[in-house]
Image (tube, rainbow, N blue to C red):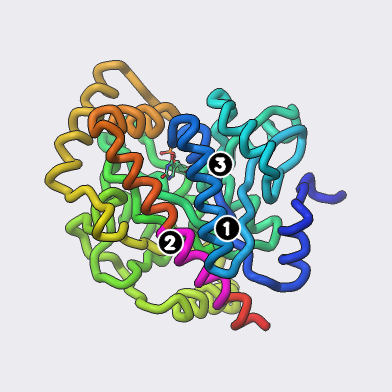
Amino acid sequence: MTLPLAFTTEVRAALDAGKPVVALESTIITHGMPFPQNVQAARAVEAEVRKGGAVPATIAVMGGQILIGLTDAQLDDLGKTPDAMKLSRADLPACVALGRVGATTVAATMICAAMAGIHVFATGGIGGVHRGAETSFDISADLVELGLSPVTVVAAGAKAILDLPKTLEVLETQGVPVIAYGQDDFPAFWSRSSGLKAPLRMDDPAQIAAAQLMRARLGLKGGQLVANPIPEADEIPRDEIMPVVEQALSEAEAQGIAAKQVTPFLLDRIFELTSGRSLASNIALVLNNARLAAAIAGEIARQRA
Ligand code: PSU
């Protein structure tokens, strides 16, 4: 039985030739940013991957297939479908089987990228352990997936809406290498530092590529998280963003927002409360991650050749 994967010609050709490919997710498009900035940002991220010498493969589910690479029209359609399913490991198969439209989170994108033979993936920030998880048990499936699927995920750390110490603890439990790029601290999405030290630090994409290839060679399941700090010019310092995060969190609690709705609700409220500044930072950090992911994909292609 063949897998229900539909590649664009460009992505298929790059994979067949062993050229670098970078996977991109689609939940950030449907649930992470408002229209039309979401589609504009997705296009800019694809362009940044190309500039870095790799082929972008944005992943989503439509018409009973997992799309590995989207056409312009598909990307546009998705950007206007805010009620697309937000897919993780649990709901990906049902979405494909029922022919629904679905946007892949970090977890689902990792699964699809691995199936497609793509080793590197760029996003904004991974999901993690939510505040109050000791009673809600709300822990993103992204953390478990990083321990399962062999994909290097480049993110600006985990979103500052989360409990970051607990997020690092769960990543450690899942056996996920957490590599800060170019600094000692684990970054906090809109801010360069979380005040926490990352378990590993690397300053060169070639080292990151070598670590992923060694993981596979040792027969160890799973990927790695590369935590790439937002560029200085685009960051919102921690003491400015945290009061806003606190306000959004208390509104979410007061309104009983739970499960898959939490992250989109918080991102949207923080966007409103910062008059759009959080979105500008979010776009800048994704572009920065796309650049690093392209460099790592290039190194993986070179080291495997
Ligand atoms: N990065 C962003 N914006 C986003 C996301 C990542 O800049 O919206 C998405 C990713 O798809 C990630 C999801 O998997 O947020 C986390 O959702 P949750 O906390 O419900 O697991």
Q: How many angstroms separate mark 2 from mark 3 (CA)? A: 18 Å
- Quadrant location, the C terminus: bottom right
- What residue would you read off at disc 2? 225
Query: Is 269 drawn above or below residue 134 in the view shown?
Result: above
User: What kind of secondary structure does the magenta stretch mostly adopt?
Assistant: helix
Identify the amino acid type marked 3: Ser
Mark 1 nearby-residue class (10 Å; few <14, some 14–19, many ≥20): many
Which of disc 1 and disc 2 is earlier in sequence? 1
Q: Earlier in the sequence, mark 2 or mark 3?
A: 3
Gap in angstroms between the C-alphas marked 3 and 1: 18 Å
Q: Position of residue 176 (x, y in %)?
A: 43, 62
Q: Residue at x 58, y 60 (%)?
A: 22
The residue carrying mark 1 is: 149
The percent position of residue 267, horizontal first and vertical second, equals 35, 34
Q: Residues within 10 Å of mark 2 (few under 14, many from 20)?
A: many
Q: Residue at x 48, y 80 (%)?
A: 206
Q: Is residue 239 above or below residue 176?
A: above
Residue 202 placement, left or right of 62: left
Range of residues picked out in magenta: 288-299
Ligand 1: which quarter? top left
Report if residue 109 is visible in the image. Answer: yes
Q: The residue under label 1 is which amino acid type?
A: Ser
Q: Which residue is mark 3?
A: 26
Name the residue at the right extreme: 1
Asked where in the image residue 63 lies, by quadrant, the reply is top right
> Which residue is the extreme one toward the top?
255
Q: Which mark is residue 233?
A: none
Amino acid type for the residue under numbered disc 2:
Leu
Q: Position of residue 60 (x, y in %)?
A: 64, 41
